[in-house]
Amino acid sequence: MSQQTLAHFVLERNIRHSPRRSPLRTLHTSLSGSDAVASPMSPDEEVIRQRGQIRTSPRKRAFQTSTPAITDIGLLDTSLDTSTTSSSGSHTPTRKSAADGVRKRLMLSTSYISSDPEDSPCPKGLTQSAAKKRKSNKGTSEMPVSINKRLSALSSEQLTELLGNLINKHPDLKEEVEKSLPKPDIGHLMDNLEYFRKNIFKSLPNSRWGSSRDAFCFRRVKTHVENFKSTCISQGKQLQDAGSWEASLEYILQAWECVGNTPDWDNVAHNKSKEMCFRNLATQCKKSIKESSLDKDAYISIKDRLEEAVSTNNQISPCIEIVDKKIQKIK
């Protein structure tokens, strides 16, 4: 019998009669002698070897090999002595000393964190910059607010009352204030009027099969039409009450064009608001021309613009005759 056959025979006998021993250990024992000869591993031996290995999941093996051990400081037994002396006299630290060292390091690392920002240490440059910023904020807060900013926060009624009180207390300022009064700006008045005009067209329904100027559409925008009419008339009257005749003429000419761009309705009765705007503006224009005192070139320019306005509505045509009389009086 050859040595290889003898080795297999011994292996099989050990597996049958000694089930508690590891097959790999039996194989190693049987072949560890001086007479053992290295032989290739058979498929049966490979299966036995794989069964004898400890089966662990890849995740557990990776955790055991790559993850460092984590010591829970809270679970350490603090009742042990800080150190023990071995029989040889050497000083051996215990678990408590290691925990104390970890605690000290944690205390040193967290000592920079404080609930109060003033108590927490910080770099010198940062502290100086923060102090400079606080000083600069204090300096800006203590600066007095300019009179122009304070006046801008007041309403027009408050400003009028303030200026009137100053003129009453100091009558000598009346003449100077009258000379310094600027020409009224009608830009905000026209923006307001244009806003109401756009609201009319925004409220018009989309009519694909019928007219967009019929009674149904008018009822949808009637409120906006009335708002436009009242705004147009009241703003012109406001300028006339202030005695700003030149600004009143400029407003009338611009508002005349704005009124002409409003819708013309199929029903004549629905155009009353538009006709009322033209009529009131024409009346205001007559009064403004009569009360105004402009130079000849200014009246000639107004006449040209009035002739253009007649093409929109002829109710303003009598104003042209009044301008001609003003031009003739000026030499």
Image: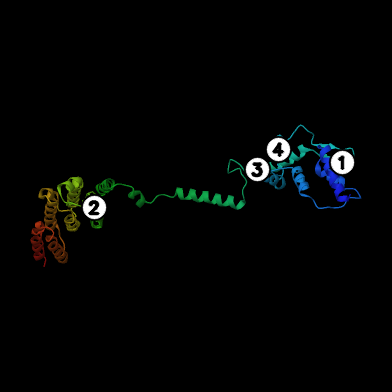
> Residue 88: where, in percent of width, then height?
90, 40
> What's under tag 4, amino acid-wise?
Ile
At x 16%, y 66%, the residue is 297
Mark 2 lies on a secondary structure that is helix
Mark 3 lies on a secondary structure that is helix
* Mark toward the start of the polypeptide (4 vs 1): 4
**Counting other residues with Cα less than 10 Å from the Cα at mark 1, is it few (<14), some (14-19), or many (20 or more)?**
few
What's the mark number on residue 150?
Answer: none
**Counting other residues with Cα less than 10 Å from the Cα at mark 3, is it few (<14), some (14-19), or many (20 or more)?**
few
Left or right of 160 on screen, residue 24? right
What's the mark number on residue 110?
Answer: 3
> Residue 108: where, in percent of width, then height?
68, 43
Q: Are marks 4 and 3 in contact (CB under 8 Å)?
A: no
- Number of the front mark, 3 or 2: 2
Distance of label 4 from label 1 (alpha carbons): 26 Å
* Mark toward the start of the polypeptide (1 vs 2): 1
Residue with the mark numbered 1: 90
Please state, as top left, top right, bottom left or bottom right, where the C terminus lies in the image: bottom left
> Residue 234: where, in percent of width, then height?
18, 48
Q: Is residue 172 visible?
A: no
* Mark toward the start of the polypeptide (3 vs 2): 3
Distance of label 4 from label 3 (alpha carbons): 16 Å
Distance of label 1 from label 3 (alpha carbons): 34 Å
Residue with the mark numbered 4: 73
**Counting other residues with Cα less than 10 Å from the Cα at mark 4, is it few (<14), some (14-19), or many (20 or more)?**
some
Distance of label 4 from label 2 (alpha carbons): 75 Å
Distance of label 1 from label 2 (alpha carbons): 98 Å
Residue with the mark numbered 2: 198
